[in-house]
């Protein structure tokens, strides 16, 4: 497959589905791949992923929902005190219990360095790749798959549709768009 130019949104790299696969395949240990999967498919901020690891009780398996109470994020600009991450795709549901049985996610600085190294080793341009990449990628995928903007905003903890507008119209190829729709088709 031809390597496309990186998509950057506010200096953060947004991965297409095949780029995400390429990066994930370079991750050397299963537990680190699981952290990557949780970051991508939940769309949580990295600090929220770290706190979720410490609080497996936030996973409401009967509702297929992750409940993030106020202490989960501590983001200064946040408008939502708490939020529910729903829908939970099958790709995430399959790894949540494994995630909690594994070592704690590394520090954000270590994770950023790891992602950069894995990207470079996989042949991807590492420019803009950081712990924000998975969150921005899944947000972009949801919008590309025509999920309603209000659903994406609520799930991701954004306070307005305006904050999501920069994810609309990203230059995914038609092949990438079809693959994104396929991967998100199990969401309900």
Image (cartoon, rainbow, N blue to C red):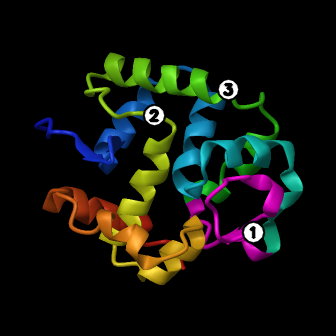
Report the side of 86 relative to 1 (left or right).
right
Question: What residue sits right under mark 1 in the picture?
Answer: 81
| Residue that sits furthest to the left in the current view | 2
* Range of magenta residues: 63-90
Q: In this view, does 137 lie to the left or right of 18?
A: right
Q: Where is residue 121 in the image (x, y as percent from the top left)?
A: 35, 16
Side (left or right) of 172 relative to 138: left
> Mark 1 and mark 3: span between their CA atoms?
24 Å
Residue visible at 59% across and 57% down? 42
Circle 2 — which element? loop
Label 2 – label 3 distance at C-alpha = 12 Å
**Disc 2 or 1, which lies upstream in sequence?**
1
State the residue position of label 3.
Answer: 107
Question: Dot 3 lies on which element?
Answer: loop
Numbered mark located on residue 130 in the image:
2
Give the residue displayed 67% in from the left and 26% down from the top: 107
Label 3 crowding class (10 Å Cα cut-off): few <14, some 14-19, many 20+? few
């Amino acid at each position: 497959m031809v390597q496309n130019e990186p998509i950057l949104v506010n200096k953060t790299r947004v991965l297409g589905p095949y780029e995400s696969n390429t990066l994930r395949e370079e991750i050397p240990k299963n537990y680190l791949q699981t952290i990557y999967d949780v970051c991508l498919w939940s769309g949580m901020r990295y600090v929220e992923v770290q706190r979720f690891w410490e609080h497996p009780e936030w996973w409401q398996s009967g509702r297929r929902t992750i409940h993030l109470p106020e202490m989960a994020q501590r983001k200064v600009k946040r408008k939502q005190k708490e939020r529910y991450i729903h829908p939970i795709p099958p790709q995430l549901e399959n790894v949540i219990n494994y995630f909690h049985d594994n070592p704690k996610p590394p520090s954000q600085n270590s994770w950023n360095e790891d992602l950069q190294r894995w990207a470079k080793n996989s042949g991807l341009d590492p420019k803009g790749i950081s712990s924000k990449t998975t969150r921005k990628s899944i947000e972009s995928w949801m919008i590309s798959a025509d999920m309603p903007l209000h659903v994406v905003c609520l799930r991701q903890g954004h306070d307005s549709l305006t904050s999501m507008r920069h994810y609309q119209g990203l230059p995914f190829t038609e092949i990438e768009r079809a693959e994104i729709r396929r991967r998100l088709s199990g969401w309900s």
